Image (cartoon, helix red, strand yellow):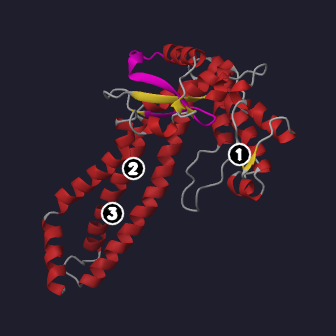
């Protein structure tokens, strides 16, 4: 057993650089897979279906999508495509400059208007195993929070275009491999600092465990920092298209907060565990925030509007 351990240790020491590069490359490739092939992965996951058939994007929403690409100044609109997705706000994946391009899903409630909420009321939504009654007080509040003005719709789509166009997926995917490489750096530095390169295997193993822990903490912190930077940057870029887009962004986040408050009430105990009283999402767990607070994203756009008024 000891001889096998020593043999593996020698092999790892001899080929540690190629193994490290291969491991980091593999993690990055795994994180980027559904962005490189969005049509066969992400789109299939988020595609809206009805009666066993994929739902086609309405002509109205296709026009909204093309208008956003034009307003944002996308030079090659063919690198972006839209599809009808489930959910209540746009989602997106892909890398525009790769052959598969970028895919953005636009939900059916974006077809709705205050005078015609059929894109919402035609859907069956279950909360805690019970179908939402759109005529009830809670159902009416939820319905109202899902109807967006044209400006808010354009901002929501532009936000996804901005995130994908600026390389947000690649930045997020790079965090894990960089932190994995950091584990090796931490291990080497600590062993040199304490003179353990030729020390007992047990102590070297302990240092490796500590390095792994530091790497994990680095990943959680870095992942949150990059995610929030990408979110805020996407908001700024989308709101910077025009003042109407910025006002639409404020409305968009106000409606999301209103929706989450309504869901918090309708879902009871589960809602209180998932949503804060403000409408923000609670952290996924103690080490990771995961979601940039919606109140913060709204306030960031309000700050841009105030700065524009002063200019």
Q: Which residue is mark 3?
A: 183
- Earlier along the polypeptide chain: callout 1 or callout 3? 1
Determine which residue is flagged by label 2.
175
Alpha-carbon neighbours of circle 2 within 10 Å: few (<14), some, or many (≥20)? many
User: Dot 1 lies on which element?
Assistant: strand
Q: Residue at x 39, y 18 (%)?
A: 78
Return the residue at label 1.
Answer: 126
Quadrant in the picture for residue 114: top right
**Mark 1 near mark 3, Cβ–Cβ under 8 Å?**
no
Q: Is residue 41 visible?
A: yes
74 within the magenta span: yes
Single out the mark in the foreground, 1 or 3.
1
189 horizontally vs 242: left or right: left
Q: Secondary structure at mark 3?
A: helix
Question: Which quadrant of the rendered structure holds the C terminus?
Answer: top right
Q: Quadrant of residue 296?
A: top right
Q: Which comes sooner in the sequence, label 2 or label 3?
A: 2
Residue under the point 70% across and 21% down: 149
Q: In the shown orientation, is residue 29 left or right of residue 213? A: left
Query: Considering depth in this image, is 190 or 236 the residue closer to the camera?
Result: 236
In percent of width and height, residue 46 lies at 51, 37
Span highlighted in magenta in the image: 72-93
What is the CA distance from the residue labelled 2 to the residue labelled 3? 13 Å
Residue at image x 28%, y 51%?
A: 26
> Quick check: can you spot residue 304?
no
Counting other residues with Cα less than 10 Å from the Cα at mark 3, is it few (<14), some (14-19), or many (20 or more)? many
Of circles 1 and 2, the one toward us is: 1
Marks 1/3: CA distance? 44 Å
Badge 1 density bin: few <14, some 14–19, many ≥20, Cα 10 Å: few
**55 is within the stretch colored magenta:** no
Q: Which circle's residue, 1 or 2, is located before the other in the chain?
A: 1
Q: Say whether residue 219 is left or right of residue 287.
A: left
């Amino acid at each position: 057993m000891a001889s096998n351990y020593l043999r593996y240790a020698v092999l790892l020491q001899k080929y540690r650089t190629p193994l490290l590069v291969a491991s980091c490359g593999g993690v990055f490739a795994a994180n980027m897979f559904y962005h490189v092939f969005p049509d066969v992965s992400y789109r299939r996951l988020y595609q809206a279906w009805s009666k066993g058939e994929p739902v086609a994007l309405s002509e109205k929403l296709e026009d909204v999508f093309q208008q956003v690409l034009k307003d944002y100044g996308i030079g090659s609109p063919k690198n972006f495509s839209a599809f009808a997705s489930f959910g209540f706000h746009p989602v997106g994946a892909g890398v525009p400059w790769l052959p598969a391009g970028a895919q953005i899903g636009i939900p059916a409630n974006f077809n709705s208007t205050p005078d015609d909420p059929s894109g919402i009321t035609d859907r069956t939504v279950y909360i805690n195993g019970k179908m939402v009654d759109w005529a009830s007080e809670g159902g009416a509040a939820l319905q109202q929070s899902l109807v967006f003005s044209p400006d808010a719709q354009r901002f929501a789509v532009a936000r996804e275009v901005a995130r994908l166009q600026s390389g947000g997926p690649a930045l997020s995917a790079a965090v894990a491999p960089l932190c994995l490489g950091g584990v090796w750096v931490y291990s080497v530095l600590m062993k040199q600092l304490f003179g353990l390169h030729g020390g007992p295997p047990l102590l070297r193993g302990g240092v490796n465990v500590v390095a792994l822990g530091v790497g994990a903490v680095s990943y959680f912190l870095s992942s949150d920092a990059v995610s929030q930077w990408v979110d805020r940057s996407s908001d700024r870029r989308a709101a910077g298209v025009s003042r109407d887009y910025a006002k639409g962004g404020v409305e968009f986040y106000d409606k999301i907060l209103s929706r989450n408050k309504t869901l918090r009430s309708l879902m009871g105990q589960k809602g209180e565990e998932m949503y804060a009283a403000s409408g923000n999402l609670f952290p996924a767990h103690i080490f990771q925030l995961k979601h940039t607070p919606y109140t913060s994203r709204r306030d960031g756009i309000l700050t841009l509007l105030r700065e524009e008024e002063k200019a």
